[in-house]
Image: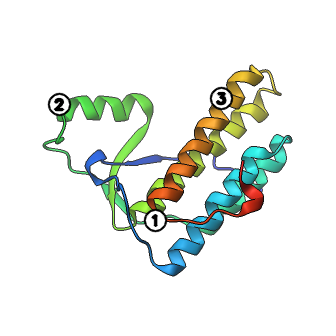
Amino acid sequence: MTHYDEFELNLLVPWDLPIDEQLSEANTVKLSQALSQILKALKQVDVSSALIIVEDELYKLGSPDVFPAKISSSKTALKSWEIEDFDSHFDVNHVESQQPAFCIVKSLMLAVYRMFVLLDKQNNNFDSTQVERQKQGYISYIRLLSRVYHLQLNPKSKI
């Protein structure tokens, strides 16, 4: 089992986030499969089983091509240095990509993976209500992505 203990969370710059986008058929299938499997992982009671599912999907998804975003003007009220401080503090990278859907899904998968790693290391010493809320947040985000990208999630994975 490969561990993604050290990973970089890549965030698309906010003005590149899609509201509605049509993907190619092949990409639609690939992302539908990935998100369906993440839903399946979120339903697992056993953290080890969930980690295996997420690791497998991370491997299958691969790494989208990303490059650091050049933020001289943020197109928001934030100044460039404020964004750099945010990125440094939260250990994230603002990026641009020709594959924004894959970048978003990969980052989501890494966040879910990280949650399961922390749960595994803490031997379930987390408040189960808070864990469930976090899982529901990820599920909501997956549903949002499925609407934005017109993805069909596996009915067995629906929650």
Q: Nearer the viewer, mark 3 or mark 1?
A: 3
Query: For the point 30% across and 48% down, which residue is it?
Result: 13
For marks 1 and 2 on the same chain, the one whose residue lies earlier in the sequence:
1
CA gap, disc 1 to disc 2?
A: 29 Å
- Quarter of the figure with the N terminus: bottom right
Q: Nearer the viewer, mark 3 or mark 2?
A: 3
Amino acid at the residue labelled 1: Pro
Q: Is residue 158 visible?
A: yes
Position above or below: 45 against 39: above
CA gap, disc 3 to disc 1?
A: 29 Å
Mark 1 element type? loop
Amino acid at the residue labelled 3: Arg
Residue at mark 3: 133
For marks 3 and 2 on the same chain, the one whose residue lies earlier in the sequence:
2
Mark 2 element type? loop
Residue at mark 1: 64
Query: For the point 79% across and 21% down, which residue is it?
Result: 125
The crowding category of the residue bearing disc 2, from other C-alpha atoms within 10 Å (few below 14, some 14 to 19, many at least 20), is few
Q: Are marks 1 and 2 in contact (CB under 8 Å)?
A: no
Q: Are marks 3 and 2 in contact (CB under 8 Å)?
A: no
Q: Are marks 3 and 1 in contact (CB under 8 Å)?
A: no
Question: Quick one: 114 or 127, which is closer to the camera?
Answer: 127
CA gap, disc 3 to disc 2?
A: 30 Å
The crowding category of the residue bearing disc 3, from other C-alpha atoms within 10 Å (few below 14, some 14 to 19, many at least 20), is few
Residue at mark 2: 77
Q: Nearer the viewer, mark 1 or mark 2?
A: 2
The crowding category of the residue bearing disc 1, from other C-alpha atoms within 10 Å (few below 14, some 14 to 19, many at least 20), is some
Position above or below: 67 against 92: below
Q: Is residue 108 left or right of residue 20?
A: right
